[in-house]
Amino acid sequence: MHVEEADLPAAAVGSILVLRPVDALSPEYARLILAFLRSASVSRLARGLYGRMRLSPKDLSALELPKADQALSAALYELDTAGQRMSSWSAEATTLAASVFDMDVSLEDARRSIIEAGQITRLRAEAASQLDDPDYIVRTRFPYPIALRWREVEARMSADDLGPAYEAVLEAAEALLAYSALIAGALAHEASIELSSVGALQRKLSSARGGPGLGEWTAVLQEIAGARKRRELRRDHPLHDLGALLRSDEAQQARGRIADRRNDKAHGRAPDVVNLRTALEQTYLDLSRLLSCARFLADLPLIHVTSVMWDAFQGEATIRHRRLMGDHPVVPTSTMQYPSSTVETGSLYVADRNHRLYVLRPFLTCEVCETCHAWSTFHADKEKGNLVQKSLEHGHHYPYRADTRVLQQAGLL
């Protein structure tokens, strides 16, 4: 156990060994060391080396402690916090159930009291159980452009509307790969990582009649998957997660089959009425595989900054923002403190697990769509040789309104 000042006075008796750090330890590093000492691997090592479970200080001195790791410590903290919260909920439910016969009332009144008092506990359990459903996770925890596309897939599939459902699955797959590639491009630009695949995007936007498609999005994700491009990044940088999206053979094969079906549809070779149901089911499974590989996106929230107030004396900014996770753009505005004055009002950001913000402009921008008047996210595209901005949510496009010099500075034009 970890003894803190609040636990004092305390005394070690019997076979308890007291381990005191030579230097002061941060709470994060202390938590990491405790996790290591409690691990099954240390237990097995102790049995293997000494043939007994009772160790002496001399025995323990042979163990090499893990080095401080901020990313692992943060992950352990989140897991420990979640475990403590669920344990408290479990204890609350147990106490409530045990109290039913302690009430000096009739069984009918006791039943009513238990139902009323246990409502929050039941709702917690119901909400938690939904997180075992991959569809629910995508619909409620993925970035808005992907979650909205997935909601349409679910709606079309549930209505057995085969043709529109098939098209919705293909569009959702392209939105997933496009969003991931655009995020990867923005993060690579921020980290000064040169990607030749972004050069291909530039050529598409500069000289081609049409804009980027599945091939270009895939090329970005495949290039960032190479360890050489990411070797200088810290271990918890989100580009490592994006690099893993298409790393597995299963993901590559699913992506390839979706690309083939997308090309077939574009060239008039869409499945006929007889084969449409089978094609829909297979493509739906491939999209589900890709979404499973992209589950890390649920931990990289898409944020729209609505205002920034910088306090020079405190050295931090008060940021008001909208967290665009789930299938609806109407979300509450939240506030966070951030130790930088470079955050832009009106821009989109992704936040990593340590709450660092990465600007997405000009790879991904946002505004109210001129066509449907819905709040939407956009990327630069090409339509009949003209530069346009295209929405990830619904595909609406119109002439590019922003400053094209920013596209040039980002290597996109």
Image: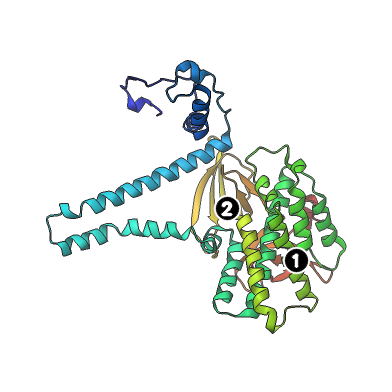
Check disc 2 and report the residue beneath it: 301
Residue 304 figure quarter: bottom right
Which quadrant would the C terminus be assigned to in this image? bottom right
Residue at 43% x, 56% y is 128
Q: Is residue 232 visible?
A: yes
- Measure how far apart labels 1 and 2 are at the Cα level: 27 Å
- What's the amino acid at mark 1? Ala
Q: Earlier in the sequence, mark 1 or mark 2?
A: 1
- What's the amino acid at mark 2? Pro
382 and 11: which is toward the camera:
11
Q: Secondary structure at mark 1?
A: helix
* Placement of 212 over or under 77, stated as above or below: below
Q: Is residue 315 visible?
A: no
- Colouring style: rainbow
350 and 64: which is toward the camera:
64
Q: Residue furthest right?
A: 207
Q: Secondary structure at mark 2?
A: loop
* In this view, the mark in front (1 or 2): 1
Q: Which percent across, then down, holds residue 41?
A: 53, 33
Which quadrant would the N terminus be assigned to in this image? top left
Q: Which percent across, then down, holds residue 318?
A: 53, 45
Q: Which percent across, then down, holds residue 300?
A: 59, 51
Check disc 1 and report the residue beneath it: 259
Q: Residue furthest top?
A: 58
